[in-house]
Image: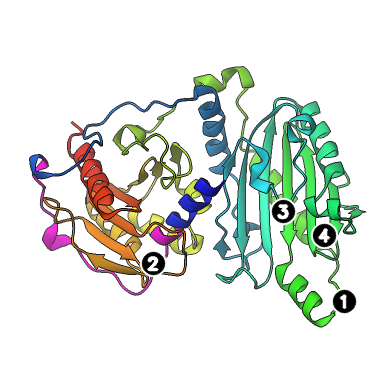
Amino acid sequence: MRAAAAAALAVSVLVSAGCGSESHAAEDKPAELSKLDTGSYPTKPQDPTVPDPAKQARILEGARLGNILPLGSEIDPALGRNGSDIHIFTEPNTYDGILNVDHFAEDAAGFVVGFATSARPADDVFLGYTLTNAVMIFDSDAAAANAANALVRRGFWLSQDGAAVDPIQSAQHPAAQIIWAPTEQRLASWYPTGKFVIFTMFDLIENRSVEHSFGVAPEPAPLALADKAIDVTTARLKTFQPTPPDKLASLPLDPDGMLRLTLPRPAGDQTSAAFTGTLDRHGMLHVVENPAKYRDLFDKTGVDSISDGAGFLVRAKDSDSAQAFLDSASASRYQQRIDPPAGLPNAHCVKYHGPDEHAAPFHCYVAYGRYAATVWSQQQQDVYQRISAQYAILANNK
């Protein structure tokens, strides 16, 4: 969980574009690969491998799911900022500390994978409310229905401390299992539909703070928003066909040929991307901090695929678009330009000086052809080697 959170924070650094950008056109000359220090990192495209193929198959199914699920802003337009939660999950620790998931394996028998998105109205997490909307896939309709019933009985983790939790009913969705904690101003809903369970949670952070600080009467449960989340998510699921469990192993690891061009994550690396795989442009909008900004940037530059490894590799429509993408993505008020690595003058490298204390301090960006790459590290020499190796992989793609 901590590793994924650190990766999500690194993503937020990548996508926190701020004041202006600078053109790299004058530096855009092919580098001499023999002069690059790539350390022990690979320098040629290679077919990806994973240590746990069965788990990876579930992750790939989760990525497929994320590519079609609605953003928080598509449920409530006021939710213009994404959170930094885990997105694809194969274990219940996504909600550890909020839900009672101690018996998840027992309660959610037949669980395959889930995809979660979270959103809030502002950068300040204490303003407004946070929406978490997730879909869990099960191996049968019966397993999904049973899981919804079992998970609602377990309820919130806070209920173990005796906090009041009330069941409520939706007239619009009577099959939804919903609980409301008025003191905590938190609602959770589990709605089974076919092989899916739609899990929706509203955390009314600002209301809770005002109530606790000033004794204001608690707000009523946001049932209308829960109903809308179910409606919007159910409509999207009509376009998704879950892979039969016995066919998961046949899902292609690298359907777009992006991973073979992406610097692979070293074993045990705790600072790289949260999973090995690819997302399409919509799927990536769940990850970036400001989805509206990046939807426009993806449209402008023709981005159609993003892969995760030891960093991110973005595929744009052409070389000019790839550079335009990096010119925007690498501009941030929290990033101070540093020298590029030896032999790679067209790399854009920065040191982060911002509020996220867990964010990786060093980032490098480079474009090659229609690809734009971003890597980060705790160490300057390591980030130099990573971006040099990523450049070499792209240059050696024959």
Q: Which mark is residue 229?
A: 3
* 133 or 206, nearer to the observer: 206
Q: Residues within 10 Å of mark 4 (few under 14, many from 20)?
A: many
Question: For mark 1, what is the residue?
Answer: 217
Q: Position of residue 336 (x, y in %)?
A: 29, 69
The numbered disc on residue 144 is: none
* Residue sitting at x 32%, y 38%: 262
SS state under label 1: loop
Secondary structure, mark 4, is helix
Q: Which residue is mark 4?
A: 223
Q: CA distance from mark 3 to mark 2?
A: 29 Å
Answer with mark 1 or mark 3, whichever residue precedes in sequence: 1
Magenta-drawn segment: 12-33
Q: Secondary structure at mark 3?
A: helix
Under mark 2, the amino acid is Ala
The residue under label 2 is 17
For marks 1 and 4 on the same chain, the one whose residue lies earlier in the sequence: 1
